[in-house]
Amino acid sequence: VSLAFRLAVLAHLFPDGGGVIVFDDPFTDMDADRTAQSCELIKECATRHQVIFLTCRDEYLDVLCGNCIRF
């Protein structure tokens, strides 16, 4: 619900794109199916907005297909 709400607010505030959203490990309480569906939603969102995704898990690198900055 939290992810859907944040994506809806972003779409409402920036209907033509150009917004920025930051996710800090949003999949911690999701099972594998919901995580896969959520990754697809985030990828679709990233076509219109800048998405910053923070995580310590490497498994999302291939799924989200973005640029990786390691600290």
Image (cartoon, helix red, strand yellow):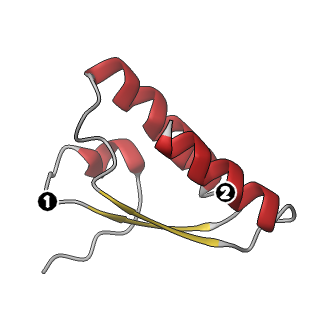
Q: For numbered disc 2, what is the local secondary structure?
A: loop
Looking at the picture, how far across and down is residue 2, in whole percent? 48, 44
Task: Give residue 32's quadrant in the image.
Answer: top left
Residue 14 shown left or right of residue 36 in the figure = right
From the image, tell me which residue sits under label 1: 56
Q: Who is closer to the viewer here, 11 or 51? A: 11
- Numbered label attached to residue 24: none
Q: Is residue 7 above or below residue 24?
A: above
Looking at the picture, how far across and down is residue 15, in whole percent? 85, 61
Q: Is residue 56 above or below residue 41?
A: below
Q: Is residue 8 above or below residue 35?
A: below
Residue name at image x 34 percent, y 49 percent: 26
Residue name at image x 27 percent, y 47 percent: 60
Amino acid, disc 1: Cys
Q: Who is closer to the viewer here, 52 or 29? A: 29
From the image, tell me which residue sits under label 2: 47
Residue name at image x 87 percent, y 65 percent: 16
